[in-house]
Image: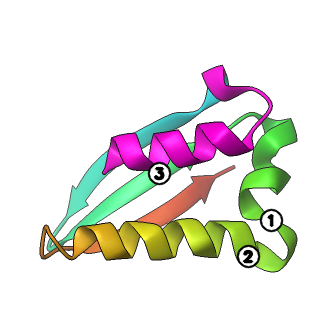
């Protein structure tokens, strides 16, 4: 799952080397924290949060196989 998120985010940003995806486990959930360069943060969030919501939807669809809850956060 982390590889999927990293692939999606790297395709969106201008500085793909700055993309870091951390996987954390909380109770019954998997939390993915995505860090990008400051200039690319707006590209990943998108207008009105549309892009990040699309990324979250893809992650939730992929998590169905794992039978886990997934949370995707963009870290400032």
Element under disc 3:
strand
- Say whether disc 3 or disc 1 marks the residue closer to the N-terminus: 3
What is the C-alpha distance between the residues marked 3 and 2?
18 Å
* The furthest residue to the top: 17
Is 65 left, or right, of 63 in this rendering? left
Q: Could you say which is closer to the camera, residue 11 or residue 34?
A: 11
What is the C-alpha distance between the residues marked 3 and 1?
17 Å
Residue found at x 30% / y 67%: 62
Residue found at x 75% / y 74%: 49
Q: Which mark is residue 46?
A: 1
**Label 3, residues with CA under 10 Å away: few <14, some 14-19, many ≥20:** some
Question: Is 25 drawn above or below residue 38 in the view shown?
Answer: below
Image marks 2 and 1: residues in contact by CB distance under 8 Å = yes
Q: Which mark is residue 17?
A: none
Q: Which mark is residue 50?
A: 2
Image marks 3 and 1: residues in contact by CB distance under 8 Å = no
* Residue 30 horizontal/vertical position (percent): 26, 63
What secondary structure prevails in the magenta region?
Answer: helix
Instruction: Tell me which segment is drawn in magenta.
Output: 1-17
What is the C-alpha distance between the residues marked 2 and 1?
5 Å
* Residue 50 horizontal/vertical position (percent): 73, 76
Question: Is 37 drawn above or below residue 47 in the view shown?
Answer: above
Q: What residue is disc 3 on?
A: 33
Between marks 3 and 1 in the image, the one whose residue lies nearer the viewer: 1
């Amino acid at each position: 799952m982390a590889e999927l998120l990293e692939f999606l985010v790297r395709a969106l940003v201008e500085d793909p080397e700055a993309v870091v995806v951390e996987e954390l486990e909380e109770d019954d959930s998997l939390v993915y924290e995505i860090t990008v360069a400051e200039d690319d943060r707006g590209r990943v969030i998108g207008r009105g949060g549309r892009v990040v919501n699309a990324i979250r939807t893809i992650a939730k669809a992929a998590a169905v196989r794992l039978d886990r809850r997934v949370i995707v956060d963009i870290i400032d």
